[in-house]
Structure formats: structure tokens, C-alpha cells
Amino acid sequence: MPRPPRPRLAVLGAGAWGTALAMQAARAGAAPVLWARDPARAAALARERENRRYLPGLRLAETVAVTEDLGAAMAGAAFVLVAVPAQHLRAVLRRLPGPPAPLVLCAKGVERETLRLPLEVAAELWPGVPAAVLSGPNFAHEIARGLPAAAVVASRDAALRGRVGDLIGSPGFRLYGGDDPVGVQVGGAAKNVIAIAAGAVIGAGLGENARAALVTRGLAELSRLAVALGGRPETAAGLSGLGDLLLTATGPASRNTALGMALGQGRSLEEALAATRGVAEGVATAPALVARAAGVGVELPICQAVAELLAGGLTVGEAMARLLARPRRDE
């Protein structure tokens, strides 16, 4: 009896995360089509079967197709995994031939110009199109290698959550459903900002006690904002909150932590960015997150300090002194 055809999925974005998701989708039994905006990169990926820039030494399965043609990538897709940085999400969504298949947004951040979360951007551009967000404590290079991991697919659409879990989940990549997309998105955005602060603490030689305290209080900030925007406090304790924050603020492969460490060592933001491979989403997210929180009357002292540090208005020492001088209260 012939096997049923593999379900087609579109993966938009051929950076580390998009490539890793395409590899995971193939591992789970789907037929992903990986779209690269740059024709030269698409040709190199198709020819070499390896993303040598971001995931060297890891080969794409033969069931992963690669193209620079956006329409071809999306043709017949069960859903579309959009794995581009948050600040480029709007530009990519605008290019989609429509109406598109259901969207699964894999960006973590807040749009700088509009202060919108990823699903809010999608709802503005494609109203009525089902959408979910995929988030969790996942380093792309580990997902690409097939190491054990878990993530959450959050959406108000239960059928979409289940479909995504069925098609890209596997025993080694456990996908949980979630019906609090606001809380999940806030967790994904805030953890990058808090990780910059955690890295700065270590880079400045302030010790692990200081990092642990900062990460814990950062989690409280994350939870307050999520609730103010309509999310649930318990989401902050899950994979997209505490889980992702722990990984990003302590994992040696974290771009945001590495950037914070460079700042803590006295390097300029320009020098730190030049040494960072890929995008440190927390840089653009920090001021946008603080502004979004101010709009709902929520204070984010740690994220505010990071925003000022990145803008050059504060040193790491000054930031820590300000945080430690805040009025003492019950936890």
C-alpha cells in the first residue's frame, strides 16, 4: 500500500531558526519548503544542502526543498512557519500572496515603530487568517541536530494548535498547546531584554548571585506586563516564560547574553553588535517593550535600565546602582 504524501509546509526565512525548523519538520514527516529572500543564498542551500553561515556541518534532508520564489514556497502549504526577526515580520507578511494558509509566527519581539506583538502585526495585515505563535527555550543549532526540546504553540484556534503539533512535533521536539498567545508573546519578547541585563551583570564581574536575582525579578516584570495586556500569570512560569528566560539568560550560545556581556566588559554597542552572529532581538525590543508597558501603566525597571544602557544614557554600574536603590518592599 503506497504511503500517503508528506504534508507540505512553508518555512519563511533561511536563517538559523528557519533552517532548523525546516529540518525538524522533515524529521517529523512533513515536506517543508524553505524560502530564502536572497536568491544567492537559496541557490547555495539547494546546492550544498547545508546552511554554512549559521548551521555548519548539519545537512538538510532530501525532503527539504529550497526556493527564492515566495509563491512557490507557499503553494499547497498546510500552514506557514514565519521565521524572520520581529523587525522584519511586517515586510515579509506584506509580500505574501493571499489570503495565505494559517500563519505560525516564530518571531520574538515587539515591533519598534508600532509597539505591536507579532500576532497583532499579522492580524492587522491579514485579518481573519488563523494564526499561532511558536515559542519556547530552543537554540536553533540544537533543534537542527535533533536534540531533545520542547516548545509551545499558542493560539485561540484549538484546531490550528493541534495541526501544528501533529505536523512538526516529534518525540524529540515536544510541542505543547497553549491558549494564552498574549502571555507567550510577552515572554518571548521580554526574555531577550532581560538576558542582555543578565549578560551585562556577568560581563561586569558582578557575580552569579546578582544574575540570579536579576533574572528572578525580570520574570516578575514579564508576568506583570503579560497580565496587563490580557495574558495569564501562570504562562510566565511555563516554557515561553521561565523556560525561555533560563535558557537565554544562562546559555553560552545566547546572542542576547553575549551582547550584554560585551557591554558589561565596557565595549560599545556597535562593537558588541559587530561581534554578534545573527540578530540580538533584545536590542530593538527593549525600548519598544518599555513603551508598550508604559501605555498600560506597568513599570519595568530592569527592561528600562537595559533600554537606557543600549541608548548610551547609562553605564552598567549606574544601572545596577539605580536598581539596588529602589524602595524595598515585600516580594
Image (cartoon, rainbow, N blue to C red):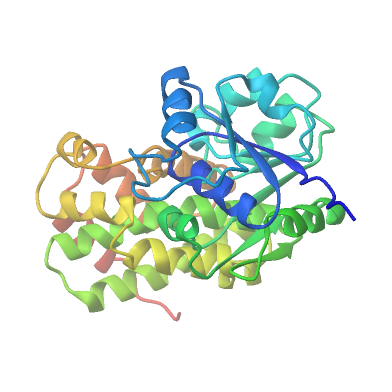
Q: Position of residue 222 (x, y in %)?
A: 51, 60
Farthest residue in the right direction?
Answer: 1
Farthest residue in the front direction?
Answer: 1
Task: Indicate the quadrant where residue 225 lies.
Answer: bottom right
Q: Position of residue 42 (x, y in %)?
A: 48, 26
Residue 230 seen anywhere in this rendered image of the structure: no
Relative to 12, is 194 above or below? below
Q: Residue at x 42, y 41 (%)?
A: 50
Relative to residue 279, is residue 232 drawn left or right? Answer: right
The C terminus - image quarter: bottom left
Relative to residue 90, is residue 284 drawn left or right? Answer: left
User: Total marks drawn?
Assistant: 0
Q: Position of residue 245 (x, y in %)?
A: 44, 64
Relative to residue 35, is residue 291 drawn left or right? Answer: left
Q: Residue at x 20, y 46 (%)?
A: 314
Task: Indicate the quadrant where residue 53 lies.
Answer: top left
